[in-house]
Image (cartoon, grey):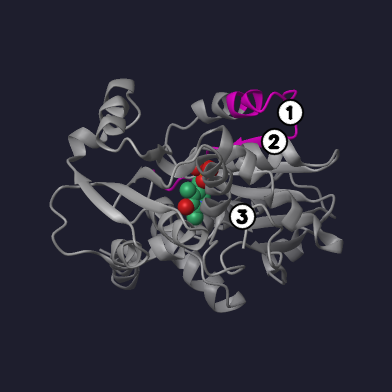
Amino acid sequence: MSISEPPARFADLQSIDDPVFRRAGIRCSILRLDTFSSYANGNKFFKLKQNILQAKAQGFTRMLSFGGAFSNHIHALALAGRHFGISTVGIVRGDNLSVLNPTLTDAVAAGMELQFISRQDYKRRNDADFLNYVRGQYPDCFVVPEGGSNVLGVQGCMEIIDHIHSHEVGRGGLIVVPCGTAATLAGIAAACDNGEKVLGFSVLKNSHYLDAEVEKFIADLSIESRDNWTISHDYHCGGYAKLSTELVSFIDKFEQQHNIPIEPVYTGKMLFGLHQMLQLPHQSIAAGTHVIAVHTGGLQGGRGMVEKMQRKRMSIASPK
Ligand SMILES: *Cc1c(COP(=O)(O)O)cnc(C)c1O
């Protein structure tokens, strides 16, 4: 199969019946990027797709990128690389990982070569001199930045709109997406129809710089700037991969009510933020809106959050 072919199938758009949305007069559907394929899981596949195409077009047979020990990006690179016939190298933060965790076990099983580096070195992953050094060590590798957040990554995310529009009810909605680097949001905003809007939920603390990042990502596509998107910075729950008891309770309840697995770092946090926002006295999403929440996947990385979530549940069960 060639990577430029259209996907074998489109992601499901699953309508959910939830009292909080119902009370606000809002329809909500979940775009299931978490389930639409075994090798192309979540938004990270979209961020990689054009990078893989470009690597192949330039004659590379190997790709290299960077990530933490539970990185969805590293996992997606390993799986997509195997599927599309390109070798992969993962530069992983942490030099003391003698026992592989489930993420890295999967990556190695998919044929990825791992190189561990210290947290200190990892901080330099975007520095020009460090990248030159890496390219010297791996001259046959096409290098992709952490998270796949380059212009090719943004271009790939424009395709998420095709998955939404493949559904009859998928046009004209408010598309909601979690934001780390906001490259995914930028791609979706760039590809939206007139009248469609995008609302991002930042999963990071002090993330107002993301607004300028989105402008930059869209400018890099050489298209006009867009005014169809906003990012909420109010629901990070303390920062990246940080949990609150409210967040964990929400996720447990949501999974039980809707039978949709979510994780607390991205999609769970976005849905929590959306729920909180809808319960504000003057919330800004108009009645009659169709909210299309993008489930960006990440369930494999959620395996690294199980214990942390359990500790929060214990603190709920026995408050001080
Ligand atoms: C990386 C990631 C995101 C964030 O994507 P950005 O393009 O960096 O904003 C969202 N959800 C999941 C599951 C991810 O792995």
Quick check: can you spot residue 142? yes
Q: Residue at x 75, y 48 (%)?
A: 174
| Residue type beneath disc 3 | Ile
Q: Toward the viewer: 77 or 42?
A: 77
Q: Which residue is mark 1?
A: 226
In front of the other: label 1 or label 2?
1
Q: Which quarter of the rendering shows the N terminus?
A: bottom right
Q: Are marks 3 and 2 in contact (CB under 8 Å)?
A: no
Q: Position of residue 145 (x, y in %)?
A: 42, 37
Quick check: can you spot residue 179? no
Q: Which residue is mark 3?
A: 3
Q: Residue at x 58, y 69 (%)?
A: 35
Q: Which quarter of the rendering shows the C terminus?
A: bottom left
Q: Residue at x 70, y 38 (%)?
A: 189
Left or right of 194? Residue 257 is: left
Q: Earlier in the sequence, mark 3 or mark 1?
A: 3
Q: Toward the viewer: 314 or 160?
A: 160
Q: Which residues fall within the magenta stretch?
A: 215-239
Q: Which residue is mark 2?
A: 229
- SS type, badge 1: loop
Left or right of 6? Residue 186 is: left
In front of the other: label 3 or label 1?
3
Left or right of 169? Residue 261 is: left
> Quick check: 68 above or below 140?
below
- SS type, badge 2: strand
